[in-house]
Amino acid sequence: MTRLQWRTAGESHGIGLVAIVEGIPAGLPLDTGRIDEQLARRQRGYGRGGRMKIERDRVEILAGTKGGLTLGSPVALLVANKDHTIEQLPVPTNPRPGHADLAGCQKFGHRDPRAILERASARETAARVAAAAVARQVLEAFGVEIFAHVVELGGEAVREGAYEAAGSDRHTLRDASDFLSLDPAADVAMRAAVDRARAAGDSLGGVFEVRATGLPPGLGSYASGPERLTARLAAALFAVPAIKGVEFGLGFAGAAMPGSEVHDPIVHAPAGNRPWGRFARSRNGAGGLEGGMTNGAPVVVRAAMKPIPTLRQGMPTVDFESGEAVQATYQRSDVTSVPAASVVGEAVIALALTEAFLDKFGGDSMAQVRAAFDYYVEELGRL
Ligand code: EPS
């Protein structure tokens, strides 16, 4: 059995993006439609630029399945780029602030930002979303749901408690929103903010929340720092381009509150609702994580995304050849991609949680994973 691992390759305007996912147990029915669904969601959102009108991302499974079932071998995926003009695109004459352009050119010792930006582009996240759409099918087989929604864009926030208020309508509500939010009134304000930013040649950031429900307690570990699930989930989110902040549960707000209001009382789980035995929590300030492990409550994590750094109005920079101060050259970009980032956030959390789930219950086949999971649930019931 291999530990879950994944890798992507591909440039923004190359032939395509590829992902290899290793460690998926054998015998998982792999639904390609569900992968395409996630790819389509990543392309959505008001405020995106011209590229998303060109691409219609679809996955091709190149390896790792037979008869629609995983084989336990590496799963290889391809998302082809319709815009594969990498050899024709111009070399920018100045590095754009906020992007990898300058530090990347310094790192490699040349003056070709295109050689950097092609891989640094957030286009790569399409491959990560495809990889996650495979991995999360393992979790979904055990009743785990991972759900992201946008909670703030350009300073316009959804109303407090929007997730709870949406209840079982959350999918319908979010999927009908151009901002992948759960608050139609906030969408109106977000749309106006995007229109203002577009008119000014500016860009906007925001915040999204990812919630994972149905996870048993004990995923991750307190025993070694790198095994702490909190660290692994934060690392997964910080590995998404433009993510500048991550918080769990009460997050930064909890730092200003007394401990008695921050920590979640342990209570008897109500009879008839004891998925993990006798214990439950009366609230969830911890965001489902204690001691670097899941505690049986939903994992709740938020990530802040900076505004897209390519601005139509430009940003001050310096011409490589002349050394003169210039405005950064504008190239096609988005006004905002916070809704898309929420889909990517959902994906990377799915990858990190599948990894932790298989660390605990892993086996070569789904039947072996199921047996380990069922034994654990039974053991929790006896505690
Ligand atoms: C993206 C594709 C890119 C951008 C965006 C994300 O397409 P292009 O550069 O050809 O217009 O739309 O990337 C960025 C804005 C960035 O800064 O990386 C995609 O597929 O998500």
Image (cartoon, rainbow, N blue to C red):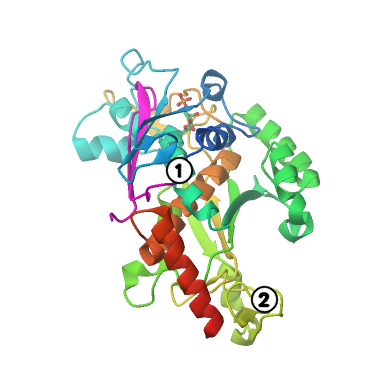
> Depth-wise, is mark 1 or mark 2 nearer the camera?
1
Q: Picture coordinates of residue 50 (x, y %)? A: 55, 21
Q: Quadrant of residue 241?
A: top left
Say if the magenta span includes residue 8.
Answer: yes
Amino acid type indicated by mark 2 = Arg
Question: Residue 335 versus residue 285: which sits nearer the camera?
Answer: 285
Q: Picture coordinates of residue 106 (x, y %)? A: 23, 38
Instruction: In the rendered structure, find residue 283 and report the number of the disc placed on it.
Output: 2
Q: Which residue is the extreme one toward the left?
A: 109
Label 2 neighbour load within 10 Å: few <14, some 14-19, many 20+ = some
Label 2 C-beta lies within 8 Å of the nearest ligand 1 atom: no
Amino acid type indicated by mark 1 = Val
Say if the magenta span includes residue 176.
Answer: no
**Disc 2, SS:** loop
Which residue is label 1 attached to? 134
Q: Are marks 1 and 2 in contact (CB under 8 Å)?
A: no
Q: Which residues are magenta?
A: 1-29
Q: Note whether 92 is above or below 359 in the view shown.
A: above
Q: Quadrant of the N terminus?
A: bottom left
Q: CA distance from mark 1 to mark 2?
A: 32 Å
Query: In percent of the image, x 47 and y 51: which residue is there?
Result: 138
Q: Which residue is the extreme one toward the right?
A: 185
Q: Picture coordinates of residue 341 (x, y %)? A: 54, 43
